[in-house]
Image: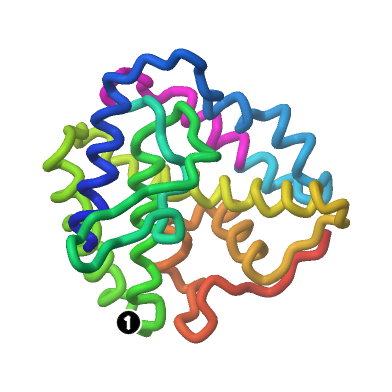
Amino acid sequence: MVLDCGKVLGKMHHISKGYTPVHRRHHFFDKFNAEYIDKLIPESLPQLKEKLVELLNTLQGLDRNQETFGMIHFDYNDGNYSIDFDTGQINVYDFDNSCFGWYMFDLASVWGNGVGWIQFEPDAGKRKKFMDDYFETVLAGYRSETTIEDSMLDQLSLFIQVCVMENIVDAFEVMQNNGEEPECDEGLSYLIKCMEDDIPYEGFFHDIYSCEEPFEYEERKI
């Protein structure tokens, strides 16, 4: 199924490369920009704001050609597709967050999906080996439907960090939309720590990670 997951994503991206919209969806930077970050993130988290803007500035320098940038799902995970286990067919839904962005973002999201398979393994080396093999399988399926440049695959760690940013922004948006005072629980504090300290791969191979309580960290005060 991992191969098919990559294959379906590759097929979607292949279609996107030839897609000419009648009514254009929004652009990644329409939402993710320094002005919005400054407005959304509390003033008590200045280092987080700084790191998010640095990340956005790095993204501004990346290629946005037809082979690297186009309509993406922006929420491609196993909660947003169903699998027919008799036929192996995958049906993708929930395109509400679709936007124009880098294809690597969707691939980085798929990388994150694989973490759940091995998150309780205490040996970081074994976790790394599993994730490398898992992502190679994803790419085999993906490349059976479309091409991707090695120079973009080299940016996997960067786009995993972009996924971390998206999760942080989403958490603060949910609090704002619900009229709640901003607060950082263990999960959000963990993501903020990864961003502020430039810890790659969501900290999955770092000392910060605990296989007993994955992706938790001491609560941050705001």
Q: Residue at x 87, y 56 (%)?
A: 181
- Give 176 or 191, whichever is nearer the viewer: 176
**Residue at image location 57% in from the left, 46% down from the top:** 166
**Rendered position, 87 above or below 53:** below
Secondary-structure class at tag 1: loop
Which residue is identified by label 1? 123
Q: Is residue 97 above or below residue 201?
A: above
Q: Amino acid at mark 1?
A: Asp
- Residue that appears at 57% across and 35% down: 54
> Residue at position x 49%, y 35% from top?
98
Coloring basis for residues: rainbow
Q: Is residue 140 left or right of residue 50?
A: left
Q: Is residue 74 magenta?
A: no
- Tell me if 21 is positioned left or right of 84 in this view: right
Residue in front for this viewpoint, 93 or 119: 93
Coordinates of residue 1 in the picture (x, y in percent):
22, 63
Across and down, in percent, residue 194 comes to 55, 58
Picture quadrant of residue 62? top left
Q: In the image, 102: left or right of 143?
A: right
Asked if residue 62 lies in the magenta stretch, the reply is yes
Which x, y percent locates residue 138?
Answer: 22, 54
Q: Quadrant of the C terminus?
A: bottom right
Q: Quadrant location of residue 123?
A: bottom left
Q: Is residue 102 above or below residue 120?
A: above
Q: Nearer the viewer, residue 88 or 110?
A: 88
Task: State which region is magenta.
Answer: 52-67
How many discs appear? 1
Task: Give residue 97's position: percent from left, percent from top.
Answer: 54, 39
Q: Residues within 10 Å of mark 1 (few under 14, many from 20)?
A: few
